[in-house]
Amino acid sequence: AQSSALLGGDAEARFTYRFATDAERAWLDAAAEDISEIVDFRSMATTEVSGETVRALAQIKGVDAAYPLFGTVALDPPIALADALATRDGVPGLVAEQVLISRLGLAPGDRLRLGTQTFELRAALTREPAGLPAGFALGPRVLVLTAALSDSGLLSPGTLFDTAYRLRLAPGAEASALRTEALAAFRDSGLRWRDNRNGTPGISRFVDRLSAFLVLVGLAGLAVGGVGVSAAVRAYLDAKTETIATLKTLGATGGTIFAVYLTQIGLLSLLGVARGLLLGAGVPTLFGPFLADRLPVPALFGVYPGPLAEAALYGLLTALIFTIWPLARTREIRAAGLFRDATDGAAALPGRRFLLASGRLAAGFVGIAAWLSGIPVLALWTAAGILAALLILAVAARGA
């Protein structure tokens, strides 16, 4: 939904070490409602401090009057970008990130050089649209007008720079059709095309890797939490030994005791899941207004029922799977044994039907995780690894 803002346009054509030719620029102008030309390169920013020359590497972005097509540039002090980059007394302006300003010991009004051109620092750059560029930035960002770089010697033939032409397309324009047409018309020109169908493949890869990481951490965390649930249920039932013995003596069946304590634990599980959902929905909503301006990408904070429902399902299934086993073992203990606190003499494994129920619930849990995660192979292998780890730990505990 935010791909145009992340890309800086509905589409982008990029060239390496050159500007677009007249034919390429004419085609781009015809294809777009509006167009912004951007030049990107690295250079040394130089200034004089106490008679000594101080240099720092900077990532220079040359822009035009149409920049930015999407979003806004935030400066400190808050002035218009056009005013910050305008030429005053023959000296063009620039804005730079605070880290570069601090590194060179500058203040608004001070002068520095890019190549052979002198610029005046007008403001600190605190936010720029399309803050996640396609390339890797080796230095702090500096914004200048491309026209002001004409006398700097930094864009001469043979120098290293990239150009990007960001397009605002007309409503209803098909980015895929324009891509096909552009690549056909300029097949051998080195033109590279991106558009808002996948304007930021780097972010897409990051999200995919983060999703994989969350599958690993999420399933492992649920397994650890489930072991904790099982231990807590067992400790709770051990403390209720006399109560359970009394109920059985008065005629309560194993099924009745199982249902009574399953209901209690179920209500506690519902309460725990509800508290977790309140935290999961409330914390982002509470801190969203404070984080929105500090993130490099547009973020929409809100309450999303789908992920919350998925989280609730995982939590309740985990509680149920790891509760059945200790409950079923208690169900099989005789009243006389309970009065003598002989819980350790109970069978190590619950009845067959409870084993089958636990296995089916676990299989269902893994199936749901594989389906909802969108990474089924990873989810299945993760579940297999967790199961193997639990079995190893169980054998080690039995051996100890």
Image (cartoon, grey):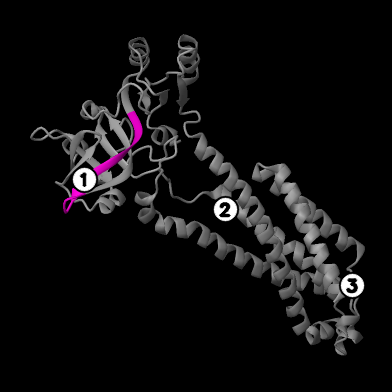
- The residue that disc 3 covers is 348
As drawn, which residue projects farthest toward the bottom?
340
Q: Horizontal and vertical percent for residue 214?
A: 61, 52
Q: Horizontal and vertical percent for residue 369?
A: 69, 49
Check the image and report above or below for 148 versus 219. Answer: above
The quarter of the rendered structure image containing the C terminus is bottom right
- Where disc 2 sits, the SS reads helix
- Where disc 1 sits, the SS reads strand
Disc 1 or disc 2, which is closer to the eye? 1
Instruction: Write down the region rendered in magenta.
Output: 39-52
Check the image and report above or below for 104 versus 35. Answer: below
Say which amino acid is labelled 3: Ala
Say which amino acid is labelled 1: Thr
What's the mark number on residue 47? 1
Disc 3 or disc 2, which is closer to the eye? 3
Badge 1, how many Cα within 10 Å: few under 14, some, many 20+? many
Q: Who comes first in sequence, dot 3 or dot 2?
A: 2
As drawn, which residue projects farthest toward the front?
52
What's the mark number on residue 131? none
- The residue that disc 2 covers is 308
Q: Who comes first in sequence, dot 3 or dot 1?
A: 1
Residue 58 seen in render: yes
Q: Who comes first in sequence, dot 1 or dot 2?
A: 1
- Where disc 3 sits, the SS reads loop
Question: Residue 344: within the magenta?
Answer: no
Say which amino acid is labelled 2: Leu
Q: Nearer the viewer, residue 178 or 276?
A: 178
